Amino acid sequence: MPEWRMVPEDVAAYFQRRLGAPGLRVTGLTRFPRGVSRETWFVDAEDGAAAAPAKQTYVIRRDLAGRSICTAPLRFEYELFHRLHGTAVPVARALWYEDDPEWSLDGRDLYVREFVDGTWNVPHFTDPDPQYDDLRVAACKEHARKLAAIHLLDWRTLGFGELTDVPPDASACALTAIDRLERKLAEVQIEPLPVVAEALGWLRDHAPRSAPRVSLLKGNNGLGEEIWEDGRIVAMSDWELASIGDPAYDFAWCQAFSAVDIKGKWNLQSFLDYYEEVSGIHVEPASIAYYKLIQALEGAVFTHNAAIPVVNNENLLARLCWVSTEVQHTMTSGLARGVGIL
């Protein structure tokens, strides 16, 4: 069997075999330019053998050459999409996971999911003109509703406890997150991290000993991380940093929406109040501040993971070099400031 590459003719042959559609042809193959941790490709295809050829777009996800930046395996991400489909949380349907070395593209595992039409952006959200204030508030409310759907999900019945660490109770959410990240760091660490070593003790000593509930968490979320259409989130994307724990963690990871501050109209507390109104879950701002330090700890871990192919001279991709240097400095210095070292 020849080595299949990420080029239209090989991708077409792969989909023909996988879908049992010998007349399928690939009319477009595009790499999505956004995103850091993995590669995302859009495959435009149509079945030329059909009486009325139907056009279909698929999404291929795979690791970077040699390694992903995040520490969770690609199959973890696939399993999340697979289990979430059909729940109250909108996601693209995962179609299959490919780990057959005879059919992998460029020798890498991949998975395929359906394409959801929409955009990662919310037009005018970042425009400071007050005429868009109501748009910003509406977008924040929509995101709060989707976070509520995630946090209220019955993750036990759906089997998410088989995929990641589960806190024994709500009082152990923060410590479980620290244990998970400390274990991951031990697997990928390439040099001493004295700041992290010092911070781990502080984080354990100051860990919140209560949480409103133990929930499925998305991890990276917010503007640029979801798919929007007509003011609604039609698919929650980027699940590679998902875990189980305190809902406050997702607000620490939330991009843009938690930072909206419109005098007399909306701020972080408004965001949390609306979230509580639709979910019944109360989140303390102090817990969010704490979990921002856990976020920095997680960032320090994945920057070391990204550095492995760089120090081994296996892959000098600019993305890997940037994450393992500048991003690492940002994460560790933020962690140092947060725990009082700087």
Image (cartoon, grey):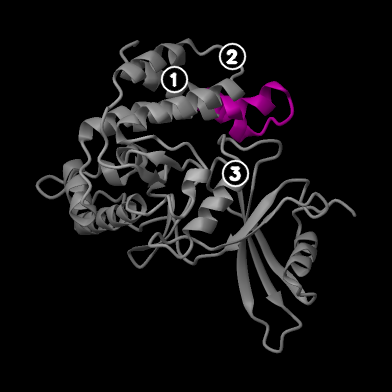
The earlier-in-sequence mark between 1 and 3 is 3
Q: Position of residue 242 (x, y in %)?
A: 46, 43
Q: Which mark is residue 332?
A: 1
Q: Which mark is residue 38?
A: 3
Q: Amino acid at mark 3?
A: Arg
Label 1: how many Cα within 10 Å (few below 14, some 14–19, many 20+): many
Q: Position of residue 280 (x, y in %)?
A: 20, 51
Label 1 and label 3: CA atoms lie apart by 23 Å
Region in magenta: 303-327
Label 3 and label 2: CA atoms lie apart by 24 Å
Q: Amino acid at mark 1?
A: Thr
Judged from the image, the secondary structure of the residue bearing numbered disc 3 is loop
Judged from the image, the secondary structure of the residue bearing numbered disc 2 is loop
Residue 20, relative to residue 70: is it above or below? below
Q: Which residue is mark 2?
A: 191
In this image, 264 relative to 42: left or right? left
Label 2 and label 1: CA atoms lie apart by 13 Å
